[in-house]
Amino acid sequence: MTRVIAIFVSAYVLVAAFPAWAESPRPNIVLILADDLGFSDVAPYGSEIATPTITALAEEGVRFTNYHTAASCAPSRAMLLTGVDSHRAGVPNIPEMLPPEHLEQSGNQGTLGHNVVTVATLLQDSGYRTYVAGKWHLGMTPNLLPSRRGFERTFVLADSGADNWEQKPYLPIYDKANWFADGEETELPENFYSSRFIVDKTIEFIDSHADDDRPFFAYLPFQAVHLPVQAPQEFIDRYMGVYDEGWDRLRYERRQRAVELGIVPEDAGMVAMPTTEDWFALSSEQKRYQAKRMAVYAGMVEAMDFNIGRLVEHLREIGEYENTIFIFTSDNGSEAAGPEEPESPLTRFGLGSQGYSTDYETLGLKGSFNSIGSSFASAAASPLAYYKFYLGEGGLRVPLILSGVPLQNDKRVGRIESAFTWVTDIAPTILELTGAAPAGERYGGRVVEPMIGHSLVPFIEGRVDRVYAEKDAVGTELAGHAALFQGDYKIVRNRGPVGDGEWRLYNITLDPGETTDLARTQPAQLQRMLSQYQEYATRNGVLAVRPEYDPQRQVAINGLRNRARTGILIGLLLGLTLLSFFFFSRAFSAR
């Protein structure tokens, strides 16, 4: 009965608020989420990687160049789907990284709380079909899976990541790769490749209701380009030789293209990350291996784009393309973790114990393990500083494209917008585009958190000049790193081993590369924003971390604790594998 009432109310709101839309079909929504995709990893943002589908969406829609998300996947996904701050939604960090003292706190488990309502639930209750295929990572118990959070059809990976070719975990912190279909544990097919499979299932879900006239919401959270970085050989081959000049050259060239495209200011500077190695100090064999690591990464990005193109073409074939709005973005910036020396005996032993090879010849193929390391990760975020897990712009600022015929007019097509936007803006934007009603103070018989995000629709339509007013403040925290945005400014504190724990102030509109710290020249601005950050942290229950807390080490500790029952040998192998993964952080902190 509650759902029937919700559908009636939503239909009334739609007719009342959007009288012009009441006579035309409500738009389908396709929400595409890449995983660990860097700011300049697709062609519309300066990449050399061929992404014709994403490029077409950008040229037919709106590109946002100042869009930010959390620096880690689960908090981003929680905010993306609910419009609520991750700390209030129960996901301050991925559960694998939470220290024991945080896990003891109610509503702080790293899984999506029941005090929030997903946009899928709201759309379903307003008459939409709702589908998800891909990575979930917001909980794997029955009441936390997407089949209980508003999605009608589901096929999801519950873990932080997994192999792209077969059903096996990418780290020994998991017993297995946990995939679920419509709420039940399931097995992957023999011919599995993640990007192809995610699109295949989405098409299957859409076609299963081809005979009804209800609109659909399809959420496609890809595994690309999360560890392990893997791609079909034909896509890898296209990039062999492209990265032979190394990461510094790539970072510079991407910055130049981003300037030419209008993605960053003409005088945007770049900092040299201390975790970037000296390319010219490498041997010829090391350069050859590193270049192929990035070639596999580029192939994985293009493979994702190719399969998104298959979905777009299918929507054209069934007559749904012209009534579909596409939203493309990433959950956070580029990933720097992974073995820095993939061919070392330690790495080979640790990964070999999981059935992975790091051999050059098969890199990226079934049975291989690949990552790009911290040096190419900085290039993937060019011209920004830092990367995933840190709150520099390279960890937080990612592509955002809104596209589709229902959005088009002469003023919107191909626009590039530099207005600050935040991940919690996506859910209210979807609600306004579809006419679905937001949740009130109570929903489904329980008290729920209100959405804090701002719909982008008034800005896209030209009714307002900014998404956020000059005085509006947006805070975020992850693993002790902290940041707050206000107007053109950002304050940020990045802990070690890469950061120094000091608060800094940047004008990220003029200086997206965070090259000039304004803390000393504008101390009043810094102090005002520090006060607002403290208000944010208090209001949202942000928990402090111990000075010695290290998130990567916590993953190993939590993994060892969870796997203790499997015996000493498994624990030893786990420790060796994780040691090889996170060695660059430890090595840097010792400098």
Image (cartoon, helix red, strand yellow):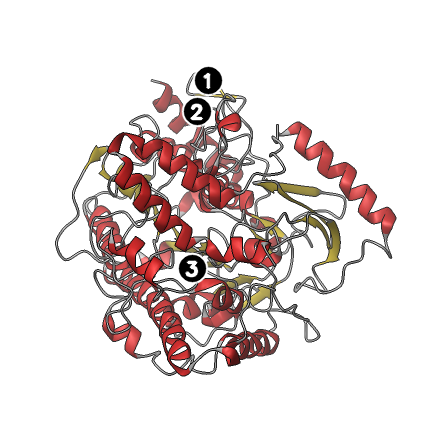
According to the picture, the residue beneath numbered tag 2 turns out to be 114
> Dot 2 lies on which element?
loop
- Identify residue for label 1: 446
Q: Which residue is mark 3?
A: 404
How crowded is the residue under tag 1: few (<14 C-alpha within 10 Å), some, or many (20+)? few
Residue 123 in view, yes or no: no
* Contact (Cβ within 8 Å) of mark 2 with mark 1: yes
First of labels 1, 3 by sequence position: 3
Give the percent coordinates (x, y) of residue 284: 41, 83
Which of the two labelled residues, at mark 2 and mark 1, occupies the earlier sequence position?
Answer: 2
Instruction: Please state which amino acid type lies under the numbered disc 2.
Output: His
Task: Indicate whether 151 appears above or below 135.
Answer: above
Which amino acid does the dot numbered 1 rest on? Arg
From the image, state whether disc 2 or disc 1 is nearer to you.
2
Q: Residue at x 50, y 31 (%)?
A: 89
2 and 3 marks in contact (CB < 8 Å): no
Neighbour tally class for label 3: few under 14, some 14-19, many 20 plus, Cα within 10 Å: many
Distance between mark 1 and mark 3 Cα atoms = 36 Å
Residue displayed at 34% across by 32% down: 562
Instruction: Please report whichever mark, 2 or 3, sits nearer to the chain's N-terminal start.
Output: 2
Quadrant holding the C terminus: bottom right
Residue 394 in which image quadrant: bottom right
Location of residue 207 in the rendering, given as x and y in whole percent from the top left corner:
20, 49
Q: How many marks?
A: 3
Q: Amino acid at mark 3?
A: Gly
248 horizontally vs 367: left or right:
right
